[in-house]
Amino acid sequence: MTRMLIAGNWKMNGDISMAQNLATTIAREGDASNCEYLLCPPFTAIQTVAAAIGDSGISLGGQDCHAAEAGAHTGDISVGMLTNLGCEYVIVGHSERRSNHGESNADVKAKTKAAVEGGLTAIVCVGESEAERESGDALAVVGSQVASSLPDAASATNTVMAYEPVWAIGTGKVPTVEQIAEMHIHIQSVLAQELGNDSAKTFRILYGGSVNAENADEILRTDGVGGALVGGASLKAESFLAIGRSCP
């Protein structure tokens, strides 16, 4: 059985001192046999976090990448730059990138393709807005995102899906267990259509959106959930590790 993935997305938070202290504590106290812990710090702290986690079994990732290998892309970072720093994963298509930077499904697909071809495991984020949820379009919206964001080379060995309802990110609102299960099962069915049943069955589909130490146990035991993409709760070692310990 594939271990659950507990990924910490630090977003634009923390200086070098905070990154070193947080990563050192997680590396020291995290039990990598229970689940796979992944830290995705800001680009400025990747090298510091890499040194802090060493050979602890904690994985390292970036928060975004560009689709191109190199070039005139001021402020961007390539897959090769991330792998050179020791990254194994990269988050692509997060709702904050889709909304703040206008990234389309085609953009996410290009980034996923670059990540996969460059040797990284892509964590592809999908999710509906509150208006789309209330209008009854959540399944259709997320299904379209899944189908349109994955390149042909995507598989369970090089890609992870992350369902993050936009209205739950950082708000404290969390979908019901029934809603989470419905969406994760729907994502798996879309993957089966796009990639084939055998591959879809082994895909890890993370849940993200106000995951914390208090609700993690229930969420991680929900049908179809293969881990968690954690935001605010990943900025404190005790809460992030508690989420990992909740893995069944």
Image: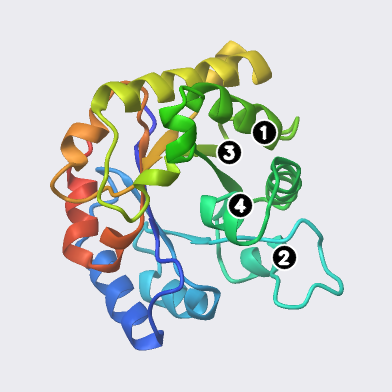
Residue 154 % position (x, y): 67, 33
Q: Which quadrant: the N terminus?
A: top left
Q: Kindly indicate whether the residue at mark 1 contacts the one at mark 2 (C-beta within 8 angstroms).
A: no
The vertical placement of 188 against 107, above or below, is above
The residue to which callout 3 is attached is 159
Residue displayed at 21% across by 42% down: 216
Give the residue type at disc 2: Ser
Determine whether, in the image, residue 68 is placed left or right of residue 240.
Answer: right
Instruction: Please name which of the two marks, 3 or 4, marks the residue nearer to the observer.
Output: 4
Q: Kindly indicate whether the residue at mark 3 contacts the one at mark 1 (C-beta within 8 angstroms).
A: yes
Determine whether, in the image, residue 35 is placed left or right of residue 7.
Answer: left
The residue to which callout 4 is attached is 98
The residue to which callout 1 is attached is 154
**Disc 2: CA contacts within 10 A as few (<14), some (14-19) or many (>=20):** many
The earlier-in-sequence mark between 4 and 2 is 2
Give the residue type at disc 4: Arg
Distance from disc 3 to disc 4, alpha carbons, whole Å, reads 19 Å
Residue displayed at 39% across by 45% down: 167
Distance from disc 4 to disc 1, alpha carbons, whole Å, reads 20 Å
User: Foreground residue, 101 or 230?
Assistant: 101
Determine whether, in the image, residue 237 is placed left or right of residue 119.
Answer: left
Disc 4 secondary structure class: helix
Residue displayed at 83% across by 68% down: 70
